Amino acid sequence: RLLIVDFGSQVTQLIARRLRELNVYCEIHPYQKVTDAFLAEFAPLAIILSGGPDSVTREGSPRAAESVFTMGVPVLGICYGQQTMMTQLGGTVVGGEGTKEFGRAYVKAEGQLDLLDGWFLTEREQVWMSHGDHVSALAPGFAVYGTSPNAPFAITADVSRQFYAVQFHPEVHHTPNGAKLYENFVRMAGFTGDWTMDAYREQAIAAIREQVGDRKVICALSGGVDSSVTAVLLHEAIGDQLTCVFVDHGLLRLGEAEQVVKMFRDNYNLNLIHADESALFLGRLEGVSDPETKRKIIGGLFIDVFQKYANDIEGAEFLAQGTLYPDVIESVSFSGGPSVTIKSHHNVGGLPEKMGLKLVEPLRELFKDEVRALGVELGLPPSFIGRHPFPGPGLAIRCPGEITREKLEILRKADAVFIDQIRRHGLYDDIWQAFVAILPVRTVGVMGDGRTYDFACALRAVTSVDGMTADYYPFSHDFLGETATRIINEVQGINRVTYDITSKPPGTIEWE
Ligand code: XMP
């Protein structure tokens, strides 16, 4: 396996993504944790030092543990990683007065380097730079293999020790040939690319059997990709020792609860309890319009309900959760201060301790796209795996203001028409998430010869890579017009349709 030492770059996760795409297993760990003892235990086949926001010229700035350079494995330093490598091995880095470089830059080759196989097929390569400091004198043993106007040491290496250091970020999109560089690096380090979801499936099943033995496991199945893949994987490993509880809070989309339950019962013969608690949830939400209060009520009730059903499953000792790798990567925090809560997310944190359960988390090592690949491997329908994300609190947060059964009914129908339109036009897979929000206002309209006084709704569709930032989807005016007409004609209770063109930030994807 490969070790990525994180110095706090915003894009460290992308390095891991690029490597996983090459079927190489890697882990990210913060530099503070990567001590000589950690390295001896982890025994990486190769090491990558990430970028980071600090300056190596600052007293007390982060450094890599000494044995990174003495354990005899290939090392690739990126940006800050390059600079600390140079500094630690006897070179010099200077502060960036006047030579800061951010954004697109072009590197020219100097000599021949295996790391750059497939590079410089034309005279220069486009790369993405983001640095204030730069190397001013190489460490002994290093030579230059690429230069850019503002970075005379853009690509450097000590080939005999297999140390490589680049000033730019090969992991980002704007370094178009970056994946090739990683491919060369892992090939030179001896990786064979055997990290596939096919192999992972076997390994994960064996690990689950080992951990669980003949004991019982419960799992909260939401119908989302993560919990679905977790459930199916566990079912394959331990069959009837698994019981899933599907908490139906009455805030799901049109026909969703029935579809999810049917799919898991028919295709997988899974022990599945359909906990229809919509009356309880909707009752408690009556008259509540504050978004955070709604979220807290739903989150709290979800835990109570799940616990009630779980208590009835005799002898359950484990709780299965679809925790993913991005949730467990420890991050390097420089600010130290707590970050602001924008929205309190829905999860079952704290539940295992309260119920005395042990955790089974078979997806802890996987990125989202790997989970999808594993789901396909396990026979989940690709259309199911490719569904847009849906938030835990469901339609409650797409119904600003007070939630009523009437509004939910209207919202479900409008949402179904919008999604149908998107599918008919072949746009579903280009969009990260699309939905309708019903607005807490009625507006006046005219239909036929009569006056109407009905709800207005907003269409929301965004593109995004990870949900952290997003942009509105640029539908054609024809598409929007046709969709508005269909919604107003087909959904009684709506007489006005708007399109939300806010990006995130400053907006959020959901309305609450
Ligand atoms: P926002 O609205 O914060 O949403 O821009 C970002 C992504 O997170 C989803 N979301 C949630 N997912 N529980 C979830 O499981 C929640 O409480 C929750 N709130 C928002 C949202 O749908 C989008 O994909």
Image: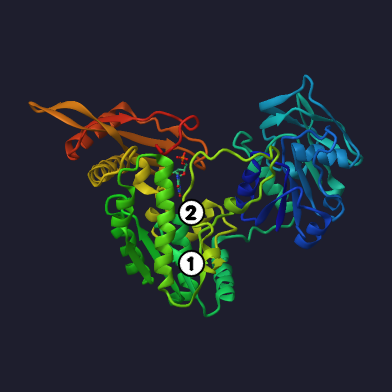
For ligand 1, which image quadrant applies?
top left
Above or below, 444 against 394 in this view is above
Secondary element at tag 2? loop
Ligand 1 is within 8 Å of the C-beta of the residue at disc 2: yes
Secondary element at tag 1? helix
The image position of residue 27, as x and y in percent, is 67, 54
Above or below, 48 against 470 in this view is below
Q: Quadrant of the C terminus?
A: top left
Q: How busy is the neighbourhood of tag 1: few (under 14 within 10 Å), some, or many (20 plus)?
A: many
The image position of residue 426, as x and y in percent, is 34, 41
Comparing labels 1 and 2, the label whose residue is closer to the camera = 2
Q: Identity of the amino acid at label 1?
A: Leu
Which residue shows up at 57% across the image and 65% down it? 199
- Residue under label 2, please give it: 347
- Chain-order first, disc 1 or disc 2: 1
Q: Identity of the amino acid at label 2?
A: Asn
Residue 474 visible from this viewpoint: yes
The image position of residue 281, as x and y in percent, is 33, 53
Q: Which residue in the rendered view is the most extreme toward the top?
A: 98
Above or below, 161 against 152 in this view is below
Using the image, tell me which numbered label, if any, was put on residue 413: none
Using the image, tell me which numbered label, if any, was put on residue 233: 1
Which residue shows up at 51% across the image and 41% down it? 465
**Residue 106 or residue 250, whichever sits in front:** 250
